[in-house]
Amino acid sequence: MIVRKLSDANQTNRRVVSPDGNWESTRLLLKEDQMGFSFHITTIYKGADFMMHYQKHLESVYCMSGKGEIETLADGKKYPIEPGTIYMLDKHDKHMLRAFEEMTMACTFNPPLNGKEIHNAEGAYELDAETIEK
């Protein structure tokens, strides 16, 4: 059994802050945990407006607090995000994420992340990212 507390993980290198200042993510479950997916609590800061395109990962995101929107770039459709909304990037959807308020999100990734991932120039995570040191 694996048991972790978010408050404890926030004080470790499991908390990753984006270099562009748009988000921070505490990675509670990672590839090394051998569960087949990773689980993160991610904060998207108010005013964030950035493109992502997970070409090698599938992601689901559940909004716990805050408001924003996601726009699929293939068709320009915009979807409001508010507490209780979940979206699934099941087709490696290239998208824009905008935070009108600070948003707290619960995120899962398949395949699981290693720990130190940040978005590359294409808005994706690399499969061979560095693992978190224990």
Image (spheres, grey):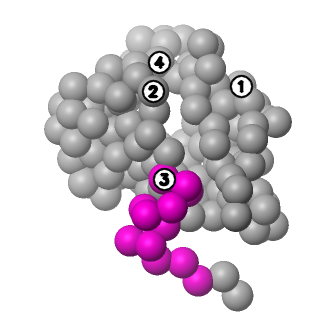
Query: Of the residues tagged 3 and 4, which is closer to the observer?
Result: 3
Residue on which disc 2 sits: 19
Q: In what element is the residue under mark 4?
A: strand
Left or right side of 50 for 99: left
Q: Position of residue 12 (x, y in %)?
A: 51, 61
Q: Are marks 3 and 1 in contact (CB under 8 Å)?
A: no
Secondary structure type for disc 1:
loop
Depth check: 109 or 73 in front?
Answer: 109
Q: Which residue is mark 3?
A: 15
Q: Is residue 96 visible?
A: no
User: Label 3 vs label 1: CA separation?
Assistant: 23 Å
Image disc number at residue 51:
4
Q: Which secondary structure type mostly characterizes the magenta part of the structure?
A: loop
Task: Specify the amino acid type for callout 1.
Answer: Gln
Q: Position of residue 66 (x, y in %)?
A: 21, 47
What's under tag 3, amino acid-wise?
Answer: Arg
Q: Quadrant of residue 18?
A: top left
Tell me if mark 2 has few (under 14), some (14-19) or many (20+) residues whose alpha carbon lies within 10 angstroms of its own. Answer: few
Mark 3 vs mark 1: in front? 3
User: Around disc 4, counting alpha carbons within 10 Å, would you say few (fewer than 14), some (14 to 19), or many (20 or more)?
Assistant: some
Callouts 1 and 2 close, C-beta under 8 Å = no
Where residue 101 sits: x, y (%)?
17, 38
The segment highlighted magenta reads 3-15
Q: Residue 32 vs residue 60: left or right?
A: right
